C-alpha cells in the first residue's frame, strides 16, 4: 500500500525487463520543483544475474533520474536471487530505506539550491564531469552542458545555484547522450552514465561546500 506500479518496459530486445514502482512520498523545493520517489525493479535475462532493486528519485519537471544506494556497501542496488521465494518483508525493508534516502536527497538538493555558483566554477565543474580527451581543451559534452544550463526544463528553479549545473548533467545524460533512447536509458540506469550522475552529485556538493 505504500507504493504502486507506475511504468514497465524492456531494453535490448527484452534482455532487460524493468518496472518503476512509485513510492507514495515526494518533496518540493524552490516553490514548485517536485521530486518523486521510485523503486526500479530490473530483471536481467542472463545466467548469473539476479533481479535488482534500486532507489530512483525523479525530478518531475524534466524526468531527470538518479540512482542512489539502498545499502551501506559500495553497490548501489539490492540483489534478489531468482532461486528465492519472493519475500514481501524484504521489499518493505527496502521501501523504508528508500524513504530515508529521499529525505537525505532532499537535504542535498536544498543545500545545492542554497549555494551560489560562479560562472568560472561551473565551467570547471563541467570539465571535471566531462573531461576532455586528446588535444581538446574542452569536451563536446562539457560545452553542451554549458549551453543547456539556462534552457533545460526547470532552469527557473534556484537560478544561479549549484542545483542548475547538477541538473544540466542529469538532463544531458538522460535525454541527449547515446545513439538511441534504448542505449541512453540503459546507460543512465545501469551503465557508465549511472555512475557519472552519482559523481556529478558528489562533485557539485563538494564544490558548493568549498564556495
Image (cartoon, grey):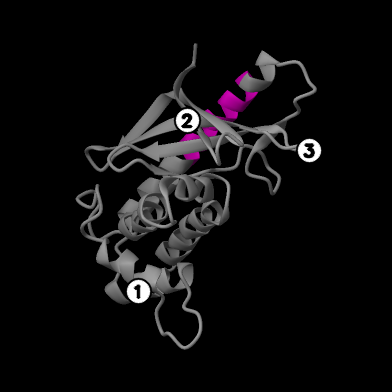
Count of numbered marks: 3
Could you classify mark 1 by the number of other residues whose Cα lies within 10 Å: few (under 14), some (14-19), or many (20 or more)?
some
- The secondary element bearing badge 2 is classed as strand
Q: Secondary structure at mark 1?
A: helix
In this orientation, does residue 211 appear? no
Asked whether the residues under the numbered discs 1 and 3 touch, taking CB atoms below 8 Å apart as contact, a structural biologist would say no
Write down the residue under mark 3: 48
Tell me which numbered mark, 1 or 3, is placed earlier along the sequence.
Answer: 3
Q: Position of residue 189 (x, y in %)?
A: 53, 44
Q: Write down the quadrant of residue 43 in the picture.
A: top right
Q: Which numbered mark, 1 or 3, is in the foreground of this view?
A: 3
Q: What is the magenta range?
A: 92-104
Residue that sits furthest to the bottom in the current view: 135
Q: Which mark is residue 123?
A: 1
Q: Is residue 118 something that shows in the picture?
A: yes
Residue at x-position 25% and y-position 54%: 152
73 sits to left or right of 11 = right
Residue 38, labelled with which disc?
2
Q: Distance of mark 2 from mark 3, alpha carbons?
A: 26 Å
Position of residue 79 measured from the top left corner of the image (x, y, whole percent): 70, 33
Q: Return the x and y of residue 113 as percentages of the image width and height.
A: 32, 52
Residue 195, picture quadrant: bottom right
Looking at the image, is mark 2 or mark 3 earlier in the sequence?
A: 2
Q: Are marks 2 and 3 in contact (CB under 8 Å)?
A: no
Amino acid at each position: 500500500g505504500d507504493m504502486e506500479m507506475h511504468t514497465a518496459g524492456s531494453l535490448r530486445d527484452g534482455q532487460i525487463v524493468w518496472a518503476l514502482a512509485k513510492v507514495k512520498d515526494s518533496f518540493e523545493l524552490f516553490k514548485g520543483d517536485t521530486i518523486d520517489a521510485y523503486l526500479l525493479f530490473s530483471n536481467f535475462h542472463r545466467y548469473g544475474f539476479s533481479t535488482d532493486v534500486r532507489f530512483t528519485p525523479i525530478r518531475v519537471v524534466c524526468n531527470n533520474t538518479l540512482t542512489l544506494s539502498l545499502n551501506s556497501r559500495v553497490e548501489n542496488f539490492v540483489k534478489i536471487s531468482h532461486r528465492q521465494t519472493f519475500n514481501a518483508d524484504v521489499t518493505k525493508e527496502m521501501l523504508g530505506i528508500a524513504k530515508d534516502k529521499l529525505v537525505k536527497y532532499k537535504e542535498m538538493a536544498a543545500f545545492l539550491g542554497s549555494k551560489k555558483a560562479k560562472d568560472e566554477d561551473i565551467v570547471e565543474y563541467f570539465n571535471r564531469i566531462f573531461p576532455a580527451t586528446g588535444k581538446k581543451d574542452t569536451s563536446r559534452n562539457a560545452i553542451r552542458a554549458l549551453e543547456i544550463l539556462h534552457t533545460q526544463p526547470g532552469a527557473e528553479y534556484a537560478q544561479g545555484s549549484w542545483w542548475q549545473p547538477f541538473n544540466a548533467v542529469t538532463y544531458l545524460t538522460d535525454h541527449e547522450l547515446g545513439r538511441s533512447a534504448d542505449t541512453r536509458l540503459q546507460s543512465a540506469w545501469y551503465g557508465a552514465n549511472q555512475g557519472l550522475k552519482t559523481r556529478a552529485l558528489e562533485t557539485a556538493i563538494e564544490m558548493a561546500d568549498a564556495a
